[in-house]
Amino acid sequence: DQQVKQNSPSLSVQEGRISILNCDYTNSMFDYFLWYKKYPAEGPTFLISISSIKDKNEDGRFTVFLNKSAKHLSLHIVPSQPGDSAVYFCAASSNAGKSTFGDGTTLTVKP
Amino acid sequence: DTAVSQTPKYLVTQMGNDKSIKCEQNLGHDTMYWYKQDSKKFLKIMFSYNNKELIINETVPNRFSPKSPDKAHLNLHINSLELGDSAVYFCASSQGTGARNYGYTFGSGTRLTVV
């Protein structure tokens, strides 16, 4: 039972444009949502999070949007930079004490 | 000064062997985790310890046994290794359980290959 899904395995965008990464979830008990970035041969690095009581959280070039009714969240990166090229994982957390991860989207930002 | 360090980084071993992966964090966090990333790239939780107490134990074969001698260390011992155990194993830590809005800090992973 895959409770967190990232349906796009890969995304390619031009430098300076917007990158939009999407994530869907099924469990209504999730109340925090997080995005992580992962470079090859490294562990995931926490990027940004959002509480289920909000619909938007912004941190610099990164903005996460949450649509609870659709059980959907997205990460916007504006403007995209070549250094943003990485695998992005969506994760969801409940008060049960664990984070459930999606299977990642590989973002490639072309110069 | 690495926040969450795992050793070894690579581990190649034969089927049937027993091996251990060590993890240490110097962040003062009280909760530590083991995640497995399989060939499909999913990160699946295996275990979590809070202040040396096991709080999450997912459906994992009992050949896998975590040990937390103190809250800064969480080791993973695997008995009778099988081909299907080949994966990347990530250790992570957080302050408090659930990593609510501040996320986990991950180690760089241990790539285990069983031949």
Image (cartoon, rainbow, N blue to C red):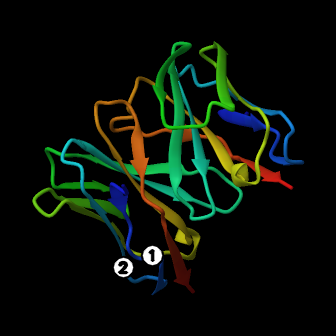
> Label 2 crowding class (10 Å Cα cut-off): few <14, some 14-19, many 20+?
some
| Mark 2 to mark 1 CA distance (whole Å) | 6 Å
Q: Quadrant of residue B72?
A: top right
Against B46, is B13 above or below? below
Count every numbered label the image shows and give the total: 2
* In this rendering, position of residue A4 left or right of residue B3: left
User: Is residue B55 shown to the viewer in this render?
Assistant: yes
- Pick whichever, B37 or A67, lies toward us: B37
Residue A94 point in image, percent of width and height: 29, 37
Q: Residue at x 46, y 59 (%)?
A: A89
Q: Residue under mark 2: which chain is it in?
A: A
Q: Which residue is mark 1?
A: A80
Q: Which mark is residue B53?
A: none
* In this rendering, position of residue B81 left or right of residue A23: right
Q: Quadrant of residue B1?
A: top right
Residue A110 point in image, percent of width and height: 55, 86
Which numbered disc flags the more N-terminal residue, 2 or 1?
2
Amino acid type of the residue that numbered disc 2 sits on in the rendered structure: Ile
Against A33, is A10 above or below? below
Q: Which residue is mark 2?
A: A18
Q: Residue under mark 1: which chain is it in?
A: A
